[in-house]
Image (spheres, rainbow, N blue to C red):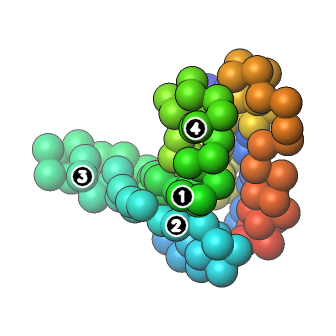
Amino acid sequence: MKYKELNNTTNYVSKKDVDVLSYDLKNILINAGFKIFLTIDQRYEANFVDLDLVPTIVLIVGNPEIGTRLMNRYPTITYDLPLKIVITRDEDDNTIVLHPDFKLMQEQHKIDIPLFSKLPKLFMQAI
């Protein structure tokens, strides 16, 4: 399946290597006030069980101040926070950045303010 065909996600395409893009995106997010809670190298973990996987990194990111306020006002958003961002390779050897569809998330949790409006610009800086 092509990543652009996935429902409920937004994706960006880059010619950068997965590791380079992950490094760049983490720095951009940190400088914008986000916290990187966890970085998971899925390919590295797959190697431990003798399986192969294209380079795939999952970033668990958030902003504790904003996230706490959102969770206090909209408790169901807790299910989706902190955010997961996936950086991987597609079948055309492009690096893909995937994240949840923020507008859909806003609708699902009946949130009356725009969610994560800074993030698309930050993703564009990284790619």
Q: Earlier in the sequence, mark 3 or mark 2?
A: 2
Q: Residue at horizontal 85%, vertical 41%?
A: 114
Number of other residues with Cα within 10 Å of mark 3, as a class: few under 14, some 14 to 19, many 20 or more: few
Q: CA distance from mark 4 to mark 3?
A: 31 Å
Q: Earlier in the sequence, mark 2 or mark 1?
A: 2
| Mark 1 residue type | Pro
| Mark 3 residue type | Glu
Q: Nearer the viewer, residue 39 or 103?
A: 103
Would you name the residue on which mark 4 appears? Answer: 71
Q: Quadrant of the N terminus?
A: top right
Q: Residue 45, how many percent across, how many down? A: 24, 52
Number of other residues with Cα within 10 Å of mark 2, as a class: few under 14, some 14 to 19, many 20 or more: some
Q: Is residue 126 above or below residue 116?
A: below
Would you name the residue on which mark 1 appears? Answer: 64
24 displayed left or right of 7: left
Q: Earlier in the sequence, mark 4 or mark 1?
A: 1
Q: Is the C-beta separation of discs 1 and 3 under 8 Å? A: no
Q: Is the C-beta separation of discs 2 and 1 under 8 Å? A: yes
In this view, the mark in front (2 or 1)? 1
Q: Residue at horizontal 59%, vertical 75%?
A: 30
In this view, the mark in front (1 or 3)? 1
Q: Residue 85, how many percent across, how many down? A: 57, 50
In this view, the mark in front (3 or 2)? 2
